Amino acid sequence: MAFLHRSIRPVSTLTIALSKGRIFDETLPLLAAAGIVPTEDPETSRKLILPTGRPGVAVVIVRASDVPTYVRYGAADLGVAGKDVLLEHGGDGLYQPLDLEIARCRMAVATKRGFDWSGTVQRGARIRVATKYVNTAREHFATKGMHVDLIKLYGSMELAPLCGLADAIVDLVSTGNTLKANDLVVVEDIMPISARLVVNPAALKLKRDGIQPLLRALAAAVVDRRKERS
Ligand code: AMP
């Protein structure tokens, strides 16, 4: 598949995989600083391959959790994926040269307000935890020597403790408004999360002339943005 893909595209073409929403919106200014501006908005266009103002560079719109897969198989040369997604995916076969410092949030454990989390942990009681991030959660609780039953969910995790499906959830928290609206509170911080640039290692070699200047421009844009904020 990867060979077919390469044979029908000129080597100079660069494809960047992005997911709609927060990652797309926050990557846009960084790409613009590198001279790459998509000519259509994925929120209004139904196109999944968006041309950009720079000839030979296209953006493909994929689901956030599919970004590592597209880049790993070389269907996209580069992509932007949250650290949460990369931890779950494993990140195998991906070069991760740059923390873009966007889509920042934290991964945390939350329970219903009033749930005696520390008491339950101290008693060594079996705890049920619902999450989309089963690998990250498993590792977190294993490191703490805690035995938990993990329940994999695909949609709103916040609902699980409210319906008695789980005692706790592991989820991303940004403003904290979603937890608050559902009477949930953070009981443990797991790690800070932000989006990373991922690159296909073979593309980095074969398309070095296209990719290296882009990496440099993106790294400079990240530094400029950090300076603006401080
Ligand atoms: P908030 O109410 O701002 O704390 O946002 C929480 C909701 O947004 C949860 O459903 C999270 O899964 C989701 N969320 C927050 N930050 C991110 C992020 N950086 N990437 C993806 N989803 C996020």
Image (cartoon, rainbow, N blue to C red):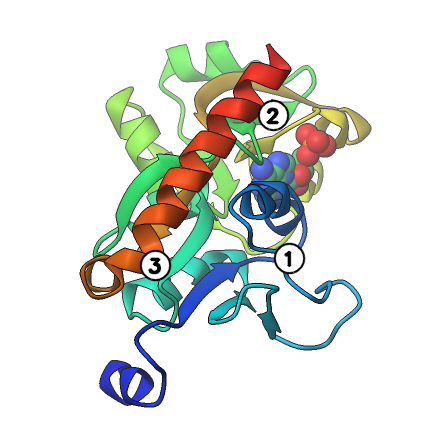
Element type at mark 1 = loop
Q: Residue at x 47, y 16 (%)?
A: 120
Is label 3 or label 1 in front?
A: 3
Measured from the top left, where is residue 52 in percent x and y? Answer: 59, 65
Q: Which residue is mark 2?
A: 111
Measured from the top left, where is residue 173 in percent x and y? Answer: 61, 29
Q: Residue at x 72, y 67 (%)?
A: 40
Front in this rendered view, residue 56 or 143: 56
The image quadrant of residue 159 is: top right
Q: Is residue 147 above or below residue 2?
A: above
Measured from the top left, where is residue 33 in percent x and y? Answer: 56, 41
Q: Is residue 84 above or below residue 127?
A: below
Is label 1 or label 2 in front?
A: 1
1 and 2 marks in contact (CB < 8 Å): no
Earlier in the chain: of badge 3 and badge 1, it is 1
Q: Quick check: 40 left or right of 115?
A: right
Q: Which residue is mark 3?
A: 210
Q: Is residue 144 visible?
A: yes
Front in this rendered view, residue 111 or 216: 216
Q: Which residue is mark 1?
A: 20
The label shown at residue 108 is none
Q: Residue at x 39, y 72 (%)?
A: 13
Front in this rendered view, residue 202 or 104: 202
Label 3 neighbour load within 10 Å: few <14, some 14-19, many 20+: some
Is label 2 or label 3 in front?
A: 3
Q: Is residue 164 visible?
A: no
Element type at mark 3 = helix
Label 1 neighbour load within 10 Å: few <14, some 14-19, many 20+: some
The amino acid beneath tag 2 is Thr
